[in-house]
Image (cartoon, helix red, strand yellow):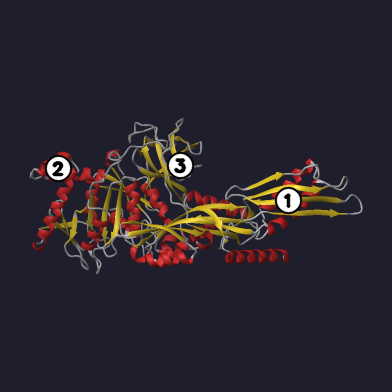
Amino acid sequence: MKAYSTEALRNIAVVGHGGVGKTTLSDGFLLNAKVTNRLGSVDDGTSLFDYDDEEKRRSLTIRATLATFEWRDRKINLLDTPGYDDFVGDVVGSLQVVDNALILIDAQSGVEVGTSRAWKYARDRHMPSFIGINKVDKEFSTFEKTYEMIRNRLGKRSVAVTIPVNEGAGFNTIIDVINMRALEYLPDASGKPKELEIPGDLTDVANAARERLIEQAAESDDQLLERYLEGNELTQKEILGGLKKGIAARTFFPVFAMASKPNVGLGFFLDVLAESGASPLDVPQPVSKDGNTKRKASESEPTSALAFKTVSEAHMGDLTFFRVFSGSLEPAGEYYNPRRENSERIGQLYFTQGHTRLDAPRLIAGDIGAAVKLKDTHAGDTLCEEGGNFLLPDIPFPKAVIRSAVEAVTQGDEDKIANGLHRLHEEDPTFHVEVSSEIKQTLIHGLGEMQLAIVVKRLKERFGVEVELIKPKIPYKETIRKSASGQGRYKKQTGGRGQYGDVWIRLEPKPRGEGFEFASEVVGGNIPTKFLPAVEKGIVQLLDDGVIAGCQVVDVKAIAYDGSSHAVDSSENSFKIAAGMAFRKVFVEADPILLEPIYIVKVTVPEECMGDVMGDLSSRRGKVLGMDAEGHYQIVKAEVPLSELYKYSTHLRSLTGGRGIHERDFDHYAEVPRDVAQKVIQEAEKEKEAEASH
C-alpha cells in the first residue's frame, strides 16, 4: 500500500441499529476496492469483518473491526461496528477516532432506537455524517417513507443524493442526483454501473431532488447562498464545493439508496466519500483533555495517539488499535503514556483488513492502525512523545446496566479468574469487575447478558477456568427508626481469673447517609476510661455483619452512658463482648429497618411501547419521575430498587421487540417495604442456618 498524506485519509465508522446490514455493506466496500474477489457473508462465516469464532457462531458483530483500503487516490480506514446494545462501547470508541460516520438504516424498518443513538453520538462529536438507506432490494422496501422519516427525525438537512429507480426485488438502478444521470448496476456484482438517461417517469422526481440538493449546497456558503437567492444558476463545481463544506460543517447529510448483496450504489458512495468526505484536516484539531493545549493534525507536531481498542489474537497476541492525531508512530519508537505514567516501546505496526495484517512502515497524523504486544497501553490511553504529558480526552464509554455474580466451579481457581477478568476488562472497558466485601461476592458489570456470557466463555477458552453466573446479592443496609436503651453484661468464671464487663448503651437514629458515630456519657468512672475504646470496638466489629439480616449497619449513633467494672476480672475483651451484647439487644428494640439501593433508570422507547414499559416499571416497585420526548421516542425516568433490576435489559428488549434501551445510576438508599423486608430477613436466616449446618 502506497503512502498517503493526511489530507488524503478518510476515516469512517459504519454505525446503526442491529440487523441493518452494516457488516455485509462493509464487506461490499472491500469487494469494490478489490481487497477480496467475493462478497463476504455473515451467515456462512466468510465475512472479513466478523471473523471471531464467537461472531461466526452467533452470526453477530461483537466488536469493531478495522479495514484499510484504497479508493480513487484516497486511503479509507473503515470501522464496522456492532449494532447490538451489549457491544455499543465499540461504537463509542470507534466514533472517537474517525472523522465521518455512515448511519445505516433498513429501508423497511426506518429510523430505530439504535439509529437515534448512533445519530446522537455523532451529533455530540459534531461529526460529518452520511446516511445510507440499505436493503432497497428487499420486497417490502419503502425508500420514500424511510427518507421522509429520516428528514422528520434526524433533520431537514438530510438530503437524498441518490434515489432508487426500480425499488424492491430486482433493484439495480439508482438516479445520481449530483450528476443527474441514472446508474444501472450489472449482475456481475463488479460494482461498475452503466450510465443511462433518467427514466422519463422519474424526471420530475429527480428535478425536485436536484433542486433540494442545490439549495442545501448553497446554504453551506454565504457567497453561494447570495448568488442562489439572486436567481443565478450554480455551476457543478460550486455545487460540489458547497456540498463538501456542508458535510464538514454538519449542515448537510447526504442520503444514499443502497443494497449490499447485489452491490448497488456502494461504489458511488465511496466516490462521494473520497471526493467530499472530511479528512483529518477538515475537523477540529486535537485538544488535550484539560483543554489547555492544541496540536495540528500534522506530522511535524509532537506525537499524540489514542488507543481505542485492544483485541487478543490467538497467534498474534494482543493487538492495540490507535488513531494518530498528531505527529507519527514509528516502529521501534519510544513513547510516553501519561495516564499510566510509564514509557511504551512500539514494536511492529500494522494496517488491517479484517483479520489480515499488512505491515505499516509508520502511522502518520490522521491515520489508524495497530501495534502488537504492548506492555501496558490499553483502550483510552494516550501515547505522546517522550518527556511529554499530552493527554487526549477520555472515550465516553457507556456505564454498565447489568451485573451478575461469578462463582468458581473449581476451588482454588480464584487467582486465575481474577487475572482473566482483569485481562478481559482491558480489552473491553465497558465490562468491569468488582470484589464486594459488603456482600462477599465477585461481581461483573456490563451492558447486557450476552456480553457477560461471552466473558464467561472466553474465561474458559483462553484462561482455562470456569465460573458460573449467579444472581447477585443486594447490598441492603440496616438502620433504626427510634431510640432505645439497654444493657449488655458479660460475666464468666473459669476457675482462675474471670471475665467481667457491664455496658449500658443508647442507640439513636441519624440522618440518612451520615454513617455511624460513637459517643460516651459515662460519668464517675463506672466504666474505666481505658475500656471505652474496647466498648466502641465491640460495637464497630458488628456493623458489617448487622443484626437482623446480616447487612451493614448505617446511620446509627451509639452512646455508652453507664456500666460497671470489676477490679480484677474486667478486661478489654470482656467489655468488647458486653458492648456487642448490648448493641444486638438494643438494636432489635429500636425499630430496625432495612434500606435498599434505589437507582434512577432512564428508559428510551418508541411511543407505542410506553404503556407496556410504564406498567412493567410499576410492577417492579418503580416510581415514575417524569417523561421527555426525543423525536419519536419517549424517555421515561423512574426510581427503581436495584433488587427489581436483575436482567432488566433482556426483559426490556423482549418487551419492546429490541426497540428499547435503558441506562441507570445509583441515587440513594430508601426503606424497604415491610413485606419485602420480611422475606429478605427470612432468607438471611435460612442462609445462616445452612452455613451453620456445614
Give me the disc on residue 381. 3
Of 134 and 398, the residue lying toward us: 398
Q: Residue at x 25, y 59 (%)?
A: 149
* Badge nearest the viewer, 2 or 3: 2
Where does label 2 land, which residue? Answer: 225
Proximity of marks 2 and 3: CB atoms separated by less than 8 Å: no
Q: Residue 14, relative to residue 226: is it above or below?
A: below
Crowd band around label 3 with a 10 angstrom C-alpha radius: few (<14), some (14–19), many (20+): many
Instruction: Classify mark 3: helix, strand or loop.
Output: loop
If the image is split into quadrants, where does the C terminus sit? bottom right
If the image is split into quadrants, where does the N terminus sit? top left
Where does label 1 land, which residue? Answer: 505
Residue 157 x %, y %: 22, 51
Q: Residue at x 85, y 54 (%)?
A: 492
Q: Residue at x 35, y 38 (%)?
A: 364
Q: Residue at x 26, y 51 (%)?
A: 130
The quadrant holding residue 469 is: bottom right
